Amino acid sequence: MIRTNETIEEFLAQHSADVAEAVRKAAAAEIMPRFRQLAEHEVDQKSGPHDLVTDADRLAEKYLTEALGALLPGSVVVGEEAVHADPATYEAVCGDAPAWIVDPVDGTRQFVNGDDGFCTLVALAQHGVLLASWTYAAARDQLATAIRGQGAYLDGERLRAGAPQPGHDLRIATSHPDYTTDEQKQALLGLWTDGVAPRACGSAGLEYLAIARGELDATAFSWEAAWDHAAGILLVEEAGGAHLTRTGEPFRVTGGNALPFTAARDEATARRVVGLLSGGA
């Protein structure tokens, strides 16, 4: 719990491991017991058949909302399911209070299908600045963390994104067509060119982790919901990567970005992807 007059930086120095433990416990209590065990009544659609929510999503978010709020009194939680219930909740991302940005199950479709490609995402931000993040792939027991200015780590090992290998196709994970406008589809067509190997993305959080590990060169995403991107954006930054919108500006977790945007292993790659997206429009 934060002490009187303790700064956010001091809080993170003392309690980052406590946040990680809360994430692990939420997954152990509410997510993993339902993995490959979901009953039909535990799965619902939100906006359509590709936008699913389960009891695991709802209950893990409730668990984290209580645990994170207790760790940092005065903070607010911006969770995907809470925002779905009350869109006004999203405004806290831009507020003065420290904001926990939570996606309880990122990759719900994979989770429902019994695929282990899902994770829990938590980021801490204030005044729109990302300060720390936790990416936990519970089914793989992998935990990636990042604190601004202190690097990115996977299970305690430093992550360095590096740069794409010269002479090889650029590996890019892209938005599912169901989540793109006609204009965005046109922009994404710029990736279908020689020297680029685009593929459909899975869990956004795990795609960001793949960039931070140097296993994926870039992403091209057409939506900006903070819970999908906040944790991964900071993880990529702290691993030495970069992120840019189509106008060449860094991605803003507070929104209003020119889409699609990219995150990449290095700035040169990010600029290359932005050029391709601009050429396709």
Image: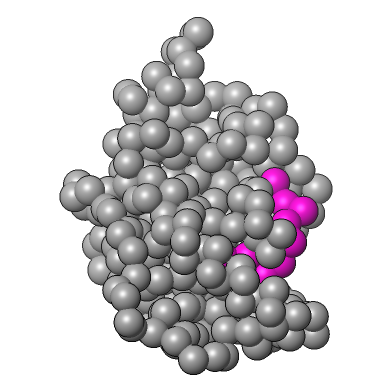
Q: How many marks?
A: 0
Q: Residue at x 65, y 75 (%)?
A: 277
Q: Residue at x 42, y 79 (%)?
A: 170
Q: Position of residue 246 (x, y in %)?
A: 69, 64
Foreground pick, 226 / 114: 226
Position of 90 relative to 11 (above/below): below
Left or right of residue 223, residue 87 in this image: right
Q: Position of residue 240 (x, y in %)?
A: 37, 50
Range of magenta residues: 254-262
Q: Position of residue 132 (x, y in %)?
A: 44, 39
Report whether residue 206 is seen: no
Q: Residue at x 57, y 47 (%)?
A: 101
Position of 29 relative to 46 (above/below): above
Q: Residue at x 75, y 80 (%)?
A: 281
Foreground pick, 137 / 275: 275
Foreground pick, 279 / 191: 279
Q: Position of residue 200 (x, y in %)?
A: 51, 85
Res 149 quadrant in image: top left
Q: Residue furthest left?
A: 157
